[in-house]
Image: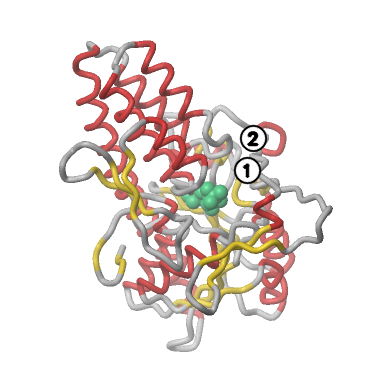
Amino acid sequence: MNVQGHPTRTIWPTTDGTAVEIIDQTRLPHEFVTVRLATLDEAAHAIRAMLVRGAPLIGATAAWGLWLALRSDATDAALARAHATLLATRPTAVNLRWALDRMRARLTPLPAGQRATAARHLAAEICDEDVAINRALGAAGLPLFQAIAARKPAGAPVNILTHCNAGWLCSVDYGTATAPIYAAHDAGIAVHVWVDETRPRNQGASLTAWELLNHGVPHTVIVDNAGGHLMQHGRVDLVIVGTDRTTAHGDVCNKIGTYLKALAAHDNGVPFYVAAPSPSIDWTLGDGLREIPIEERSGREVSHVQGRLPDGTVATVDILPAGSVAANPAFDVTPARLVTGLITERGVCAANAAELRKLFPER
Ligand code: MRU
């Protein structure tokens, strides 16, 4: 997507071939800063500290991280160590395991001397594949927008509500939940996005708003609690969110607060769609509520908020009374019964095991 008019991905190998470069998402929206990752530890840190985040981008960064590790030591032991180090960075998004297992399966049979080069090629392939998948998600979701637009007065925008950042910045390019939004916007359909700010880390306010602004998509940032009210008053035509892990039965784990949006949508008859690329489907799990590991992050993300001061400097302030304790579960599970449909790269399906398997018979 565009950053100040320039097509940009979220991760790319440097031209000298010695590292990968990422956008430091902890600095957005106030500063656009790129960071070089040259070692396994730097890649693991980037994922853990959320310089990169979002399920597909976590997987892509881990793939490059494995390449960085194998350049200095490509033995079986080093491969196992790097795989374990990267897998331990964040627990919820299954794309991390998906990318690492795919890399390991391809690299293990090779002689050690060929592994680093093969890892570089496969990491690039995973990134290109992510872009292709997200384009296909956009095409698959576009008819939903066309149908809603056709029912509305000419020129009236399709109002979408989204949560967290399941946009270009969560992936290598295009995003997942935003892919159909960009596709509709680029096809000339009037769209307007309600952007949940998404406390505690504000990925909606800081990241989704920033990327929609860069692509010229009309949007309005709202507090997380406003969505239900807007739905009650007919101001949301559909909800589209991303997913960090979708079970084989269609339960969806996504950023904390997604479940409440699904409940409000259900109560108000608003369609609730999940953009679910296949690498975020965990075919080994059935019951999302009991089986998906939910990341518990530091209470500091709840107690402290980052923003820009009038003099332009970026600062972090404490908003809690001294002595109060904060808890920070980072994801929740929306049961399949609340999901209108899953938008996959192979088409839209109902959120259940039978329909998912029709689209992915090889699983
Ligand atoms: O904690 P984050 O910022 O990594 O969480 C990201 C999300 O919850 C996204 O909505 C999710 O990764 C889906 S995007 C494919």
Q: Nearest the camera: 329 or 279?
A: 329
**Residue at horizontal 37 percent and vertical 63 percent from the top:** 32
- Secondary structure under tag 2 reads loop
According to the picture, the residue beneath numbered tag 1 turns out to be 251
Which quadrant of the figure has residue 61?
top left
Q: Going from the N terminus, do you reach mark 2 or mark 1 first?
A: 1
**Residue at horizontal 40 percent and vertical 35 percent from the top:** 62
Q: Nearest the camera: 79 or 314?
A: 314
Q: Amino acid at mark 1?
A: Asp
Percent of width and height locating residue 264? 72, 64
Counting the numbered discs, the total is: 2
**Residue at horizontal 27 percent and vertical 46 percent from the top:** 12
Percent of width and height locating residue 46? 44, 42
According to the picture, the residue beneath numbered tag 2 turns out to be 292
Placement of 150 over or under 121, stated as above or below: below
Residue 342 in view (yes/no): no
Q: Residue furthest bottom?
A: 154
